[in-house]
Amino acid sequence: MIHVIATISLKPGVRADYLEILKSNIPNVLAEDGCLGYAAATDTDSGLEIQEPLRDDAVVIVEKWESLEALHTHLGMPHMADYKSKVVDMVTGVSLQVLEGVS
């Protein structure tokens, strides 16, 4: 199983608009062959001293895929190109971690 942690850095003040666009695309992603999970998350204050500083202008997408092939196919899907075209002016950067599950 492949896990992906995608951190999307946004321009100040656009997170709510970005999340609307992202949330409208999530059903398309979940319907893809090989997608086992795809969800958005934002920082929340846990009260734990070890926690990194909160980021008001970031969204983390947590993904699960059956295989690297499924992940690669996902990136080329038409709905992903449409999503990217809608958010291009909101995003300042993307950080991606691709992990393989250990059993």
Image (tube, grey):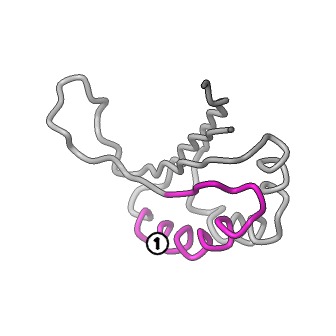
Horizontal side of 52 relative to 80 (left or right) equals: left
The correct choice, above or below, for 30 with respect to 95 in the image is below
Position in image of residue 80 (x %, y %): 74, 65
Question: Quarter of the image containing the N terminus?
Answer: top right
The correct choice, above or below, for 9 with respect to 17 in the image is above
Position in image of residue 29 (x %, y %): 67, 65
Inspect the magenta stretch and tell me whether residue 22 lies in it: yes
Q: Which residue is painted at 56% across and 67% down in the image?
A: 22
Inspect the magenta stretch and tell me whether residue 65 lies in it: no
Position in image of residue 47 (x %, y %): 14, 36
Badge 1 element: helix
Q: Which residue is painted at 31% across and 30% down in the image?
A: 52
The correct choice, above or below, for 33 with respect to 69 in the image is below
Position in image of residue 40 (x %, y %): 48, 57
Residue of label 1: 17
Of all residues shown, which one is farthest toward the left? Answer: 47
Identify which amino acid the numbered label 1 is placed on: Asp
Horizontal side of 40 relative to 87 (left or right) equals: left
Horizontal side of 99 relative to 71 (left or right) equals: left
Along the line of sight, which residue is nearer the eye, 60 or 94?
60
Q: Which residue is painted at 62% across and 30% down in the image?
A: 101
Along the line of sight, which residue is nearer the eye, 64 or 76?
64
Stretch in magenta: 15-39
